[in-house]
Image: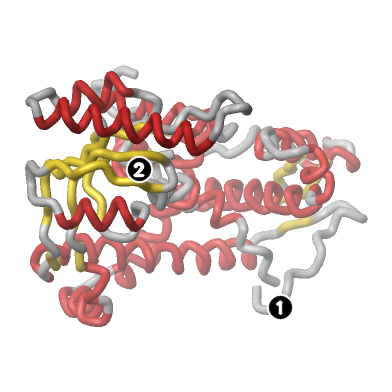
Amino acid sequence: MKRYLTIVAWLVILVVAFGCRQKPSAETEKEGPEPNAPAQVDTNVVEPKQATKAASDGVAVTVNGVAIMETDIEADIKKMTAQAPPAYVEQNKERFRQQVLDRRIAIQLIGEKARAAKITVTEEDIRVQVNEIVDQQRMSVEEFKKMLQSRGMDYDEWEQQVQWGVMLGKLVEADFGDQLTITDTDANNFYSANIKQFDTPEQVRVSHILVLPDTTDPNTDPNEAKAKALAKAQDLLKQIKEGADFAELAKATGGYPSAPRGGDLGFRPRGVWDEPFEKVAFELKIGQTSDVVETRFGYHIIKVTDRKEASRKTFEQAGDEIKSMLKRRKQSELFQKYLVQLRTEANIVYPPGKEPPPAPPGL
């Protein structure tokens, strides 16, 4: 009765947004114009094609009498796997086909339900949701567009996924709104049970100058290269003690990612940098500069520019954030139940020989 719930991954907005940025490496650093009035977004899913008029081998499935064509499924698969190795796509083609088919069915059912319930999604609704997602990724809209492009996804198509996610959210809100209420007690219980999540460890903001041993010549003696790098680092340290500008020396030294920023590595807690680097960084006071420190990357001169002591958010500070998180979690659960309910109530007909495989136990 229930189909795979991979459709949720296509429709729940926070999943489509690819999650958070990756955690910084443990290495040191190898280290349109807004409309005046929101326009109503069309809730039609596909141009309706009556199954009786379509060639049977061209129909993938009919949903309440509307045909979803094989050409649509193939086009979606092509887009979804554009950056995947051909061998991988071939090996998993049936899984990809089922994911796309489930998504198409879900979108058709959501569109039908939205029209029946007179649910509309405006451009303003989409803009608000897009901005929320982009803000969560700590990017500008332009940066986000480039990130999507790098992953083989067109921004306009992604925005259409946002539209369907907003529509699904409105449907769930209309039918299950009373189940989405998060009380102060709910939030306080979560805070008490997960108190460590609200701890921020001690952090220091560090700039560094890194001198890398020059081993570009394969005939270079590694020990000689290290000796030259150490001598250069010691000379730079001497210049700093004599009043040279740390950031300008970092830029001039170059050859490592943070050099253009004057060596600034930002705030970091313990456990990010190599142990020798970290030990010195957390021992220094604000404004202090270290002696030359050796790590596996080379020779560093470290300067601490700021510090944050360990702290814990109070419930008053974290309460709204917790409520939003708990509501999103509840929405996700209801989304899945709602989509299963829509499929159960629908008349979904597969042409002979195109029936999907049975769902795994528990789905």
Residue type beneath disc 2: Gln
Badge nearest the viewer, 1 or 2:
2
Which residue: 67% across, 53% down? 102
How packed mark 1 is, by other alpha carbons closer than 10 Å (few <14, some 14-19, many 20 or more), is few
Evaluate if marks 1 and 2 touch, with contact meaning CB atoms under 8 Å apart: no
202 w.r.t. 83: above or below: below
Which residue: 30% across, 51% down? 277
* Nearer to the camera, 310 or 183: 310
148 vs 284, left or right, is: right
How packed mark 2 is, by other alpha carbons closer than 10 Å (few <14, some 14-19, many 20 or more), is some
Q: Write down the quadrant of residue 78 in the picture.
A: top right
* Nearer to the camera, 262 or 344: 262
Q: Position of residue 354 (x, y in %)?
A: 86, 54
In which quadrant will I find the C terminus? bottom right
Residue type beneath disc 1: Pro
* Nearer to the camera, 5 or 300: 300
Q: Which mark is residue 361?
A: 1
Q: Mark 2 sits on what residue?
A: 137
For mark 2, give the secondary structure. Answer: loop
42 w.r.t. 1: above or below: above
Q: Which mark is residue 78?
A: none
Mark 1–mark 2 Cα distance, whole angstroms, equals: 35 Å
144 vs 98, left or right, is: left
93 w.r.t. 156: above or below: below
Which residue: 47% across, 33% down? 224
* Residue 166 can be seen, yes or no: no
* Residue 225 can be seen, yes or no: yes
* Nearer to the camera, 23 or 171: 23
